[in-house]
Image: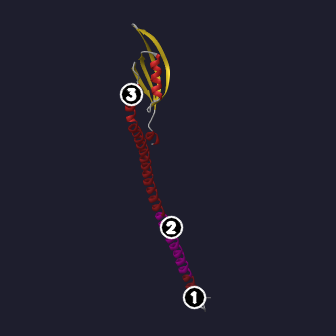
Amino acid sequence: MPSINLLPWREAERKKRQRDFGVAMGGAVIAGIAVVMVTMLIYSQMISGQQSRNQRLTSEIVELEKSIEEIDGLERQKERLLARMEIIERLQKSRPEIVHLFDEMVRQLPEGVYLTGMKQTGSRVEIRGVAQSSTRVSALMRQIDASDWMGDPEVERVETKQAGSSRQSEFIVYLKQKRSDSEEEL
């Protein structure tokens, strides 16, 4: 016997609901995929933005490190120049000292004493010479001690030798060159 559906509208309604469910399910899947894609796009843009900021920061750090190295180089150069300036300044201050030393040596040299050599190391001066007698060497030492530019005389040796018909005393005396008060304050 043929089957007759007395309620065909239910069957049509069921098919319509199944079709609506399929469309809704497809729409939900498409919407889910769209949300996932939009979320991925947003995150990828955020990541690329952060990477570009990181890249810019890295390039700025490199530039700053170059600037720091340049500044360090300039600081070292400045220190070297200041050291040179200080040396030049000390030399400029000590320039007249040798003039004072020679001038004072001529003034304090007693009669009968002749210098054969003079050597300066720092502020210490070695004087070699010949005197008519050892008392003249003593006189030289007293005058050095009383000088404004020289002081602390020390005798290393005094040798009396016969030179023809006369006797001579060869001597080596050390002294310290004094600096003026204005130079010591600077």
The residue at which mark 1 appears reads as 13
Look at the image and give the residue range highlighted in magenta.
Answer: 21-49
Can you tell which quarter of the image residue 64 is in?
bottom left
Secondary structure under badge 1? helix
Task: State whether residue 144 appears in this view.
Answer: yes
- Specify the amino acid type for callout 1: Glu
Between marks 3 and 1 in the image, the one whose residue lies nearer the viewer: 3
- Specify the amino acid type for callout 2: Tyr
Mark carried by residue 91: none
- Mark 2 vs 1, N-terminal side: 1
Can you tell which quarter of the image residue 170 is in?
top left
The residue at which mark 3 appears reads as 107
Q: Residue at x 38, y 28 (%)?
A: 102
Compared with 169, 99 (above or below) is: below
In the picture, the quarter occupied by the N terminus is: bottom right
Looking at the picture, how far across and down is residue 79, in whole percent? 44, 44
Looking at the picture, how far across and down is residue 167, in whole percent? 43, 10
Looking at the picture, how far across and down is residue 147, in whole percent? 44, 30
Q: State the residue in front, 38 or 180.
A: 180
The residue at which mark 2 appears reads as 43
Secondary structure under badge 2? helix
